[in-house]
Image (spheres, rainbow, N blue to C red):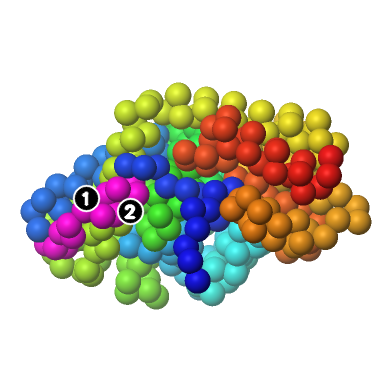
């Protein structure tokens, strides 16, 4: 089967920044090579800037974003700990599953999909949980939730934020907001191939972590040797790092910081605005609540009588354009269109609108 130059505009991997893609072709470094250690340290520092934090324990975990979620829970909650999770989409649901597997007493605060997190309802769910978890940018619904009220009212609880779809696309200010733990993925707005989980934990959460979590691989205490400068400890061998991926992430982050975070966020905002206005002009209805729509991931209702899968297949075959299906109960009734990383550009907006117009006959 021949490989095509797809334009990936779904909720999953985006097309990478050219710098990040080129870096994947560099000669591989050994995971103990001093040059790689320098790159790892620089990558961690660049992640701090993009995360908006001074957390010294900020690093790329050697696994996908889902491992960032798992690392957050296994290192901070154990049997009997109370965890409150704001659920307004698929990834909030997944958080409840992961927390339950740690033996936690999980309180899921359910929201209608397409709506933002109601901070007061979450805070009222339990008087003293060990951890409160929420998704900043819900990938399954295209909804942005402001987590500042959760942070202000968390009390003694730790606050965990899923930033998989937000990091690199919209402002993520961990320290300013008061978020204790956060994780992301390399494959979305950071514009890098999937495979790494940017992760950050502050001193407050570090001091309350599980001493010997159930996962050896994701034990942040053991990872101190791998992370070195990022965790304030000496270097010891923990695992063989995916050196090519770290070099690529470093290049992607460098490209973002060279453009400037404010400029990158503004570019994503403008692309999202143009797309959502254009979809409206085509007579399509947006799914996420007005005023809480992500610019980098737009959800749109499939018109009545239209076969969602057939449209997505035609877009792929005729235009080499991939958009995503919905999730959960909305798998066949919602499309998810991502404008992330280098795809956050007017030409990509024009492409998706023209292709949809042609396929839908509008």
Residue 135 in sight from this viewpoint: no
Q: In this picture, which residue range is highlighted in magenta?
A: 20-32
Q: Identify the residue at image location x=53%, y=53%.
A: 6
Spatial CA span between label 1 and label 2 = 8 Å
| Image coordinates for residue 342, horizontal then vertical, percent | 47, 38
| Image coordinates for residue 153, horizontal then vertical, percent | 59, 39
Residue 188 located left or right of residue 149 = left
Quadrant housing residue 290: top right
Residue 1 located left or right of residue 107 = left
Residue 60 located left or right of residue 11 = left
Does label 1 or label 2 sit earlier along the sequence? Answer: 1
Task: State yes or no: residue 25 in magenta.
Answer: yes
**Residue 335 or 60: which is nearer the viewer?**
335
Quadrant housing residue 208: bottom left
Identify the residue under disc 2.
Answer: 60
Task: State yes or no: residue 275 in magenta.
Answer: no
| Image coordinates for residue 152, horizontal then vertical, percent | 56, 35
Whether residue 281 is situated above or below residue 335 in the rendered picture: above
Quarter the C terminus occupies: top right
Secondary structure of residue under mark 2? strand
Identify the residue under disc 1.
Answer: 40
Secondary structure of residue under mark 1? helix
| Image coordinates for residue 197, horizontal then vertical, percent | 40, 56
Dot 2 crowding, Cα within 10 Å, few <14, some 14–19, many 20+: many
The answer to the question of whether label 1 and label 2 lie on touching residues, with beta carbons closer than 8 A, is yes
Q: Identify the residue at image location x=39%, y=75%.
A: 214
**Residue 142 or 203: which is nearer the viewer?**
142
The outermost residue toward the left is 34
**Residue 109 or 281: which is nearer the viewer?**
281
């Amino acid at each position: 089967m021949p490989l095509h130059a797809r334009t990936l505009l779904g909720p999953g991997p985006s097309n990478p920044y050219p710098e990040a893609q080129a870096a994947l072709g560099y000669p591989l470094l050994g995971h103990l090579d001093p040059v790689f250690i320098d790159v790892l340290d620089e990558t961690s520092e660049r992640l701090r800037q993009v995360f908006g934090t001074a957390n010294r324990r900020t690093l790329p975990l050697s696994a996908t974003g889902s491992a960032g979620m798992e690392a957050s829970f296994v290192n901070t909650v154990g049997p009997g700990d109370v965890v409150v999770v704001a659920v307004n989409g698929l990834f909030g649901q997944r958080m409840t599953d992961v927390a339950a597997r740690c033996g936690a007493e999980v309180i899921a605060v359910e929201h209608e999909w397409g709506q933002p997190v109601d901070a007061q309802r979450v805070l009222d769910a339990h008087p003293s949980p060990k951890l409160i978890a929420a998704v900043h940018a819900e990938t399954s619904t295209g909804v942005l939730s402001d987590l500042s009220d959760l942070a202000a009212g968390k009390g003694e609880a730790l606050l965990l934020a899923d930033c998989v779809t937000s990091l690199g696309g919209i402002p993520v200010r961990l320290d300013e907001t008061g978020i204790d733990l956060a994780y992301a993925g390399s494959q979305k707005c950071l514009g890098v191939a999937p495979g790494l989980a940017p992760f950050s934990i502050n001193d407050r959460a570090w001091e309350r972590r599980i001493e010997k979590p159930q996962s050896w691989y994701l034990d942040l205490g053991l990872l101190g040797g791998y992370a070195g400068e990022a965790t304030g400890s000496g270097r010891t061998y923990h695992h063989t790092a995916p050196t090519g991926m770290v070099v690529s992430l470093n290049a992607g982050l460098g490209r973002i910081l060279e453009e400037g975070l404010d400029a990158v966020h503004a570019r994503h905002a403008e692309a999202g605005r143009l797309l959502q206005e254009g979809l409206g002009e085509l007579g399509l209805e947006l799914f996420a609540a007005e005023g809480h729509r992500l610019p980098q991931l737009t959800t749109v209702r499939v018109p009545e009588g239209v076969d969602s899968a057939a449209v997505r297949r035609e877009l792929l075959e005729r235009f080499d354009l991939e958009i995503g299906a919905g999730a959960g109960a909305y798998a066949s009734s919602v499309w998810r269109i991502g404008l992330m990383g280098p795809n956050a550009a007017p030409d990509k907006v024009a492409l998706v609108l023209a292709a949809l117009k042609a396929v839908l006959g509008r």
